Image (cartoon, helix red, strand yellow):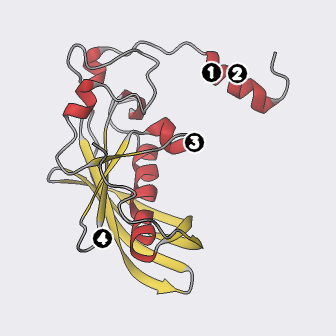
Amino acid sequence: MPNTPCEIVEFLFNHAPAPAPSRKALAISPGSFSHPGAMSDDLTEGQTAVVPDGFVSNVWGHGFGHAVGPFFSRRDPQTNLEVMAFRVAAHHANGMNNCHGGMLMSFADMAWGRVISNQREVGWVTVRLVTDFIGPGLMGDWVEGTSEIIAEDGDIFTVAGRVWSGERVLMTGTGVYKGIRSIRRKAGYREAKE
């Protein structure tokens, strides 16, 4: 039996029954949801069928990104600019069955900070994130986000970013990030695997 608060939370997380979501709430077709307790890296045929061409799955083996994903990205090899994306699913929903604002902010944080990883090959932590909500992320929407570095002072980077779905802008804002370590990568380490 768990004794500490951390052990109790871990026990509840691992043993709590997952509610069975309705197909309408998930905006999915029959057979595209494997089971109510599916993890974010258990991509079903229905989920992978709706990933636009050019996007590859981002591998999150553990932690927060694993819990709220799956995430995808597409990078331009000439400019090294990257667009990160996810599809709004039941585990992203708020009480109105739209994408929760906290999910959009978390996504913006990850998507906007990636420009530092890609353009400067530096790992980072978030210092400040300021966002303006422009429109809702609807159930089933393919949501994309990216940013650009607008200021740099030593290991402090300021970016301007946006999050959108199709023609609708969902969020704009700025982020301040602190570079913490070099993350030089081997060529092709994030290429799509056959």
- Whether residue 127 appears in this view of the structure is no
* Residue wearing tag 1: 14
Whichever of labels 4 and 2 marks the residue nearer the N terminus, that label is: 2
Secondary structure of residue under mark 2: helix
Question: What is the three-letter code of the residue carrying label 4?
Answer: Asn
Q: Nearer the viewer, residue 194 or 152?
A: 194
Residue that extends furthest to the bottom in the rendered view of this protein: 153
Quadrant, the C terminus: top left
For the residues bearing labels 4 and 2, Cβ distance under 8 angstroms: no
* Residue wearing tag 3: 63
Residue that extends furthest to the right in the rendered view of this protein: 3
* Residue wearing tag 2: 11
Whichever of labels 1 and 4 marks the residue nearer the N terminus, that label is: 1
Q: Position of residue 167 (x, y in %)?
A: 14, 53
* Residue wearing tag 4: 80
Question: What is the three-letter code of the residue carrying label 1?
Answer: Asn
- Name the residue: 43% across, 84% down: 151
Would you say 189 lies left or right of 12 here?
left
Question: What is the three-letter code of the residue carrying label 2?
Answer: Phe
How many C-alpha atoms fall within 10 Å of the one at disc 1: few (<14), some, or many (≥20)? few
In the rendered image of this protein, does residue 147 appear above or below residue 156?
above
Quadrant location of residue 43?
top left
How many C-alpha atoms fall within 10 Å of the one at disc 2: few (<14), some, or many (≥20)? few
Cα–Cα gap, marks 4 and 2? 42 Å
In the rendered image of this protein, does residue 46 appear above or below residue 167?
above
Question: What is the three-letter code of the residue carrying label 3?
Answer: Gly
Q: Position of residue 29 (x, y in %)?
A: 20, 18
For the residues bearing labels 2 and 1, Cβ distance under 8 angstroms: yes
In the rendered image of this protein, does residue 66 appear above or below residue 22?
below
Whichever of labels 4 and 3 marks the residue nearer the N terminus, that label is: 3
For the residues bearing labels 1 and 3, Cβ distance under 8 angstroms: no
